[in-house]
């Protein structure tokens, strides 16, 4: 896990049912806990080997939902719901029409609907991009003109139009100990 050696004691084949999709996949067992024992600790860790077999997907942490091409499911979570923030989401839009060539990553110049006083963090990308398999990389943005990295893994060019909403963001806050925090409404 994350480059840390873990002693495995066995494996078993399991059938995963994720929405309407069934996948047979091997899971591995360790001889001790290798994850935190906190209210929001993991029950299971799904690796890229399993996740790559699903259609394009996203996680909406605020609604505790897992979305993929036309389907949504609830995420089991033992942590209590996060408190609601009064922060209004900040819409991120394309500043100029941009063609995303097939199988490339492209920096897209963007603007925000409002000018935040401090840095913001992307909290979600628009569903219409997911339908086209376009992915926007996570980012922390400073106020003003912004460039986001968009990935088009498909075999056809896609167009992002001037003014098109591609993401929402929320304020990035600083804690008393100078660490960064995000409004709990969005995460």
Image (cartoon, rainbow, N blue to C red):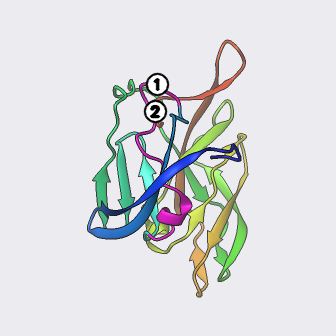
Residue 112 x, y percent position in the rendering: 61, 48
Label 2, residues with CA under 10 Å away: few <14, some 14-19, many ≥20: few
The answer to which quarter of the image holds residue 103 is bottom right
Q: In whole angstroms, how far apart are the C-alphas of marks 2 and 1?
A: 5 Å
* 128 relative to 183, above or below: below
Residue that label 2 marks: 41
Q: Which label is found at residue 38?
A: 1
* 108 relative to 28, above or below: below
Frontmost residue, 2 versus 169: 2
Q: Count of labels shown?
A: 2
178 on left or right of 32 = right
Visible residue check, residue 172 = yes
Q: Are the residues flagged by discs 2 and 1 in contact, CB closer than 8 Å? A: yes
Residue 181 x, y percent position in the rendering: 60, 27
The answer to which quarter of the image holds residue 72 is bottom left
Residue 187 x, y percent position in the rendering: 48, 36
Frontmost residue, 95 versus 41: 41
């Amino acid at each position: 896990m994350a480059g840390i050696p873990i002693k495995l004691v066995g494996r078993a084949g399991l059938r995963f049912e994720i929405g309407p999709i069934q996948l047979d996949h091997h899971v591995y067992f360790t001889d001790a806990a290798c994850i935190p024992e906190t209210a929001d600790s993991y029950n299971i860790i799904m690796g890229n080997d399993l996740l790559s077999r699903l259609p394009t997907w996203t996680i909406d942490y605020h609604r505790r939902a897992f979305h993929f091409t036309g389907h949504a499911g609830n995420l089991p979570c033992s942590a209590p719901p996060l408190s609601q923030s009064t922060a209004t989401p900040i819409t991120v839009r394309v500043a100029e029409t941009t063609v995303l060539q097939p199988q490339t990553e492209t920096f897209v110049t963007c603007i925000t609907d409002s000018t935040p006083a401090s840095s913001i963090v992307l909290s979600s990308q628009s569903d219409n991009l997911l339908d086209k398999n376009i992915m926007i990389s996570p980012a922390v943005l400073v106020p003003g003109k912004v460039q986001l990295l968009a990935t088009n893994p498909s075999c056809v060019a896609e167009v992002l139009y001037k003014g098109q909403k591609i993401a929402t963001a929320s304020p990035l806050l600083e804690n008393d100990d100078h660490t960064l925090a995000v409004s709990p409404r969005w995460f």
